Image: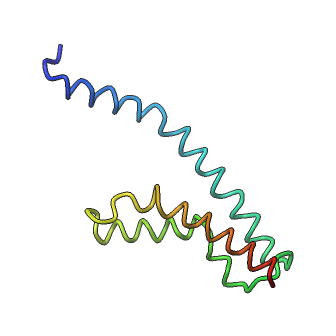
């Protein structure tokens, strides 16, 4: 039995993280790829009246940018891909819809 309670807690949390990693990753794929794919198809087919470069305003592109930033400086950008950049991508998709409504 482990005498250090912090090691025990760390082992329990690592086990829980390993158990939920795959379902959360699949949920992220569904929540990120499906709306992004629909938006890209709508822009290229002309259903959204926005410039074509706005296909870059989505969670997938911003997550890739977050991975690049984390590769540059992991201490500063350690949570960029997972937390911040995917949410920025969702906000940018909202900007695309506002531009479509106003345009």
Residue 52 left/right relative to 84: right
Q: Is residue 69 above or below residue 54?
A: above
Residue drawn at (54%, 45%) of the image? 25
What coloring was used for the rendering? rainbow
Where's the C terminus, which quadrant? bottom right
Looking at the picture, how far across and down is residue 15, in whole percent? 37, 29
Along the viewing direction, whichever of 68 and 95 lies nearer the viewer: 95
Q: Is residue 82 above or below residue 57?
A: above
Quarter of the view holding residue 54: bottom right
Looking at the picture, how far across and down is residue 63, in whole percent? 50, 64
Instruction: List the single residue furthest toward the front.
Output: 102
Residue 30 left/right relative to 99: left
Residue drawn at (41%, 34%) of the image? 18
Residue 102 left/right relative to 74: right
In this rendering, the count of numbered labels is: 0
Along the viewing direction, whichever of 7 and 25 lies nearer the viewer: 7
Looking at the picture, how far across and down is residue 23, in whole percent? 56, 38
Residue drawn at (46%, 56%) of the image? 82
Looking at the picture, how far across and down is residue 83, in whole percent? 46, 56
Instruction: List the single residue furthest toward the left.
Output: 3
Q: Is residue 102 above or below residue 78?
A: below
Residue drawn at (28%, 63%) of the image? 74
Residue 64 left/right relative to 52: left
Quarter of the view holding residue 1: top left
């Amino acid at each position: 039995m482990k005498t250090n309670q912090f090691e025990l807690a760390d082992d329990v949390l690592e086990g829980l993280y390993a158990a939920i990693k795959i379902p959360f990753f699949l949920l992220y794929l569904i929540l990120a790829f499906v709306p992004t794919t629909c938006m890209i198809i709508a822009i290229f087919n002309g259903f959204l009246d926005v410039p074509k470069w706005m296909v870059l305003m989505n969670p997938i592109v911003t997550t890739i940018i977050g991975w690049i930033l984390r590769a540059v400086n992991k201490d500063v950008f350690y949570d960029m891909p997972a937390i911040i950049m995917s949410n920025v991508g969702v906000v940018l998709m909202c900007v695309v819809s506002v531009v479509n409504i106003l345009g």
